[in-house]
Amino acid sequence: MSHPPHLNQGGSNFEGTTVGQRVSLGNKTCYRDNTTHVTYHYYDSGHTRSEDRDLSHEISCRDQEPRGQKRKLEDDHEQVDQNRYHVLLESLRFKQIDARYENIKRAHGKTCKWVLNRPEYLDWLNPDKTEDHHGFLWVKGKPGAGKSTLMKFILSTARTKMKNKVIISFFFNARGETLEKSTVGMYRSLLLQLLERLPRLQRVLNPMLVSGINENQNWSVESLKELFEQAVQSLEDSSLVVFIDALDECNETEIRNMISFFGDLGDLAVSAGVTFQVCFASRHYPYITIARKIDLVLEGQEGHEQDIISYLDSELKIGNNRVANEIRAELKDKASGVFMWVVLVVGILQREHDYGRNHTLKQKLREIPGDLHHLFRDILTRDNENKDGLLLCIQLVLFARKPLRPEQLYFAIRSGEDKTILPWDREEIPESVISKFILSSSKGLAETTKSKREPTVQFIHESVRDFLLKEGSLKDTWPNLNGNLQAESHQRLKQCCFDYTTAYTSILNASAKEIAVVLDKTDESFPFLRYAVQSVLYHANAAQEWGVSQTSFLQMFPLPDWVDLDNVFEKKKVRRHTREASLLYILAEHNLAHLIEVCSSNQSCFLVEKQRYGAPILAALATGSHAAVRELMKAEVKDEPLTSPLHALCDQYSLDRGRRGGIGRDFKYPNGRTLFSYLVEDGDEALVAFSRALGQINTELEERTRDGRTALSLAASAKSSGLVQTLLDVGAVVNTADNRGRTPLFHAAENCDEATVRSLVSKGANIERADKYERTPLSHAIRNSTPSGSMRVLLELLLSHTIIDKPDFRGWTPLMHAAKSSNLDAMRLLIDRGADINQVDNDGYTPLMRAAFGDFTAGTKLLVEQGADINQVDNDGYTPLMRAAVEGLTAAMKLLIEQGADVNLADNSGRTALLSAATEGSTDSMRLLIDQGASVDATDTTNGRTILSYAVESSHQVIVLSLLDLGAPINKACTTGRTPLSYATEPRFENHMVELLLSRGAAVDTPDVNGRTPLSHAATSFSNENVFKLLLDHGAAVDSTDNNGRTPLSYASDFYFRSENVVQLLLDRGAAVVSIDNPFEDE
């Protein structure tokens, strides 16, 4: 590397030309002149909830030119950390979310296109006919007719042609994991897609409403429906199209509930003028009615029949002679529109042809059953080769706890056949061998999915599963089956898992510690071992459920050894068990209710163990194992007389839990609380009554938790009005406040639980009381509410005893909370009751500002219509329009401007809405304001900078051009003397902004107050070489000196290791190597 030229700089140290810069010429060191100091001040009352944290930022910039407008951080509900939203979004995602869609084969090149011209499809797309069908199209067909392939084609076409619409989809998969075949999974998937495509709708994820949800917990159907409905109602001008396939592969009750919900959504959308379209696909059965829809039945459709012909012409390669064409015609007629039957038969006939048996093709086709189920039976009984392996393969694919990976299935079958286990040698057994083995073992009825995340083995079609589960279907192949396929299959899979783990342990012959070391890479060497360990008790439980006794199995089950192996596969240390864990605890944690029923242990479920959740009853509650809870209760009273009321309480325990209790997977016992307090927090009235009647644990009602909460307070949070009433009836104190000053009424209001609020008020709960943050129950209710009839009743109840405009510790009134929560109904109610629409909080914000700042257009419109001051300013001098402009909320801006907002008002720093938008780089806001006549030559009072200056610094070339065309002063300098061109020399702009300004006549050598020209600033900004060339080509003085006598070459040489080419360029352009500095002496 060449060395820099020797510069005569005197080697002296002096303060740089910009305040705070320290330049040492002797050792070529420099501290950048635009350092930003950020200090974070936290207030924490000791609670973990974000609402108890007051976070303020102090931002001071030494050069007094802040890059962005200072932010005020308000209440956590007003400005929730984006990480929280990310966690909530990620909790919607699940591993196989797109597995079914990915596994559906793409439509053959010449098929499915007919549907795009069908009157039914065109009517569905026609907005003029929405009133007739409310946006619903339902594709129906026989099993195997090709509905999913058609749906994938329609969806793919929609994504291509409907660019202006939001398109989301879900394909049910009965062969997949639980979330793939349930409406919970469907709602999670649809909601995630919608919120990711329209981020503005993420405000429906009110963290207070879903605070109990995280990546380790489950969403309830009701909470997902509520959020999805809110999102659809908030679509405004956006259009939403939803595709849902294979409704018949989900539980019928769930689908009926979902169809009813979507029907209501369609009605709401039509009445609100929102574009909401849904395309369903399913078999004809079960028949579910929806009031308005269009049906598209595949059978008899000329296009569908033509699809079969096209497929045969392309895939059945047996020639085009007369016989071949007769075979194709006969095959089409025999198919009766069932595409899956065609695909299977084409494979059979193609093999015959490839073996040179053309003369047998017609006879072979006649022998093949025309019914799909009969065809499956024919495939299974065609030969007697490896019938035991075939049965085990079918049982594993049909009844595995979750779909197995190809290598898992391979080694499971091998171990079942050979009764031995061996490590996976990938050279001896490559994946291609495994694929062939599975194809052979299943006789072609199973295949590996095309999932990008984790391929699994599933049946080629749901109709295969239907056939196998049909009573007596397997008798022809396996006469020894006694008819209870589920019982025998789970018993065999249990034994398969147990034998595998036992064999592995015996091979290892090691202690628990050594096992952990060896098993570090066990998934690679023994792919089936993880499943075997984690599923042996699952299959035992299922076998017990179907009538095969597991009593003796449990008595000999080697629990400590199993715990050792299970711990190895548990990545999170907190979820591991000690070797002393009881069998009852393990069964309770895994919801193995049928095994609990026959477990011979006399242990009490309330006995606390040295495990994560303490007692078995808490382990069951924490994991949502409600069937296990009931069996644990029954086990406690098995010796009680049948007349004991305890038996009735066992039966009253609710297995249908639409919500999760307060106990979740993330809790650990103990936490300074009694076992009884956790039972109360779970919220089941029967369980609490059972524990009190049993008398085995401390059930004191007024005993407090660490945060000061009583049993009644915990019950009020559990949304269990019956439990609250029970506790009130036995003497619970109604107005006891916790450490945050909140009584049970606060928690009930926070949960928007009208029934509980009524019960508490009837017992004398104080409605006017405020907590330590000066918030009343009314404020809490509004902060966490969603529009509904019951919510209006609740608010009216609380309003009857509350000061309507009572502010909290930050000055927020209930109306402000309603505006921020986007609750239009609550806003209307409060305004009707006389709420002050212009009251300001501690920061000077009005309800209108809250609504506008939250992009709540309907709320903004309501407040304006009610006379809210549209130009009122906050403590910083910001108007609602300015706040909206900074955030780029163009819908709110348009509304405010239409209602008369002044686009040229200035804040306390002299910044107009346009100038603030330029500061933040909000292009859409700037364009709108310019179109509405905002002044382009305004300057702020802090730095004297122009709108053009900030737009240049934000690198918005289109906006800069617009400003220049409108006459923005191109050479106007700020208080430090820097022009827009000076700011344009920042390295992130490369050279396009400099080139633009120079082309429009920017002065190239204007010095700032320190005498530095744009070329001088470029030298300390690490600008690229092209910037220097542009400036020099336009006449920049290569040897200009600043107030300290330094030239651009002098500055560039300080950073020679990054500016070698620049130094050489300056020298080539005539820069003097020896310059006269003007250092001042050190004193």
Image (cartoon, helix red, strand yellow):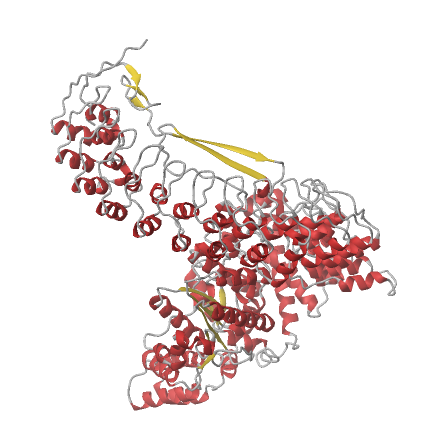
Residue 1069, percent from left and from top: 12, 29
Residue 703, percent from left and from top: 78, 43
In the depicted structure, whether residue 714 falls above or below residue 739:
below
Residue 151 visible within the image? yes
Residue 3, percent from left and from top: 20, 24
Residue 485, percent from left and from top: 63, 73
In the depicted structure, whether residue 123 falls above or below residue 427:
below
Work out which quarter of the rendered image holds the C terminus and state it: top left
Identify which residue, 781 or 552, lies in the foreground: 781
Could you tell whether 518 is left or right of 981 in the image? right
Identify which residue, 46 or 310, lies in the foreground: 46
Picture residue at 38% right of the left edge, 81% below the top: 119
Identify which residue, 628 or 837, lies in the foreground: 837
Could you tell whether 1003 is left or right of 505 in the image? left
Work out which quarter of the rendered image holds the N terminus and state it: top left
Picture residue at 27% right of the left edge, 47% below the top: 959
Could you tell whether 92 is left or right of 731 in the image? left
Question: How many numbered marks appear?
Answer: 0
Residue 96 visible within the image? no
Identify which residue, 493 or 751, lies in the foreground: 751
